[in-house]
Amino acid sequence: MRELCGASEREASPAGYRTRCETIGAAGAFTGGVHKENAMQVPHNTFVVVADGKKMLFFRNEGDAEFLKLEVEGKRVQADQSDQEMSTDKAGRTNDASGGAGRSAYEETDFHQLEEDRFAHETAEILKKRALKNEFDQLIIVAPPRTLGELRKHYHKEVEKRLAGEIAKDLTGHPVLEIEKILMAAD
């Protein structure tokens, strides 16, 4: 981190508090005159995956940490299926175990959620294969909280070693410029 003020201005301010001085970090980002010390870094050539349970976008930062320029490297979309296509039977029923004459219905399986979880697992497998081929050194993953949780269950150790950050947001429907802004503002 480098300071953008002189020694006399530093001495005039109490320790740890800046009035007229500002600091700038490696990313060069300012936030209302205060540097975000823990701002996420997205250096040149960082691999960025933006995913949800149905869509996966692969980006590479062709810019640098200060001026992101995400270029689309790939895209994968899962086709939507109707409940009828995914399920074959109606929810099952069982007799009341307490000896009563009533019957109870089992909760129907959420096939859409199962498909989203399976898609997250496939995303983790793709990341594993790419990490093992050394196709990226640093990785940032952007996904809704539930999808991110499912991805984490399946991270390979090589993916974990290269993971530079995660953002728990659904940005698959956002334009690239907005994704870049969110990445630059992320902690």
Image: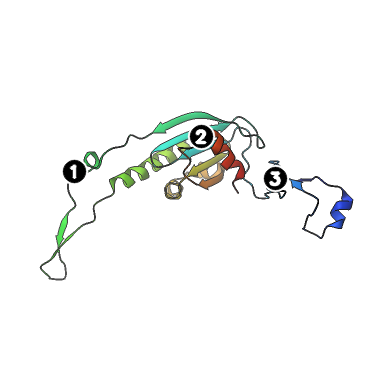
Q: Residue at point 49% right, 33% down?
A: 58
Local crowd at mark 3 within 10 Å, few (<14), some, or many (≥20)?
A: some
Marks 3/1 in contact by CB < 8 Å: the verdict is no
Q: State the image coordinates of residue 20 (x, y, percent, origin top left).
A: 81, 51
Q: Tell me the distance, in whole angstroms, between the alpha carbons under discs 3 and 1.
A: 56 Å
Q: Residue at x 42, y 50 (%)?
A: 146
Q: Position of residue 5 (x, y in %)?
A: 83, 47
Amino acid residing under circle 3: Phe
Q: Nearer the viewer, mark 2 or mark 1?
A: 2
Describe residue 4's horizontal placement relative to residue 78 as left or right.
Answer: right
Residue at image mark 2: 175
Earlier residue among tags 3 and 1: 3
The residue closer to the viewer here, 154 or 86, is 86
Q: Mark on residue 88?
A: 1
Mark 1: which amino acid?
Thr
Contact, CB < 8 Å: mark 3 with mark 2? Answer: no
Q: Mark 3 — residue?
A: 30
Mark closest to the chain's N terminus, 2 or 1: 1
Q: Which element type, helix, strand or loop, lies under badge 3?
A: loop
Instruction: Kindly identify the amino acid type of the residue bearing the numbered disc 2.
Output: Pro
Residue at 47 percent across and 29 percent down: it is: 74
Check the image and name the residue furthest to the right.
8
Q: Earlier in the sequence, mark 3 or mark 2?
A: 3
Is 42 in front, or is 170?
170
170, above or below 177, in the image:
below
Q: How are the colours assigned in the image?
A: rainbow
The span from disc 2 to disc 1 (Cα, nearest Å) is: 38 Å
Where residue 177 sits: x, y (%)? 56, 34
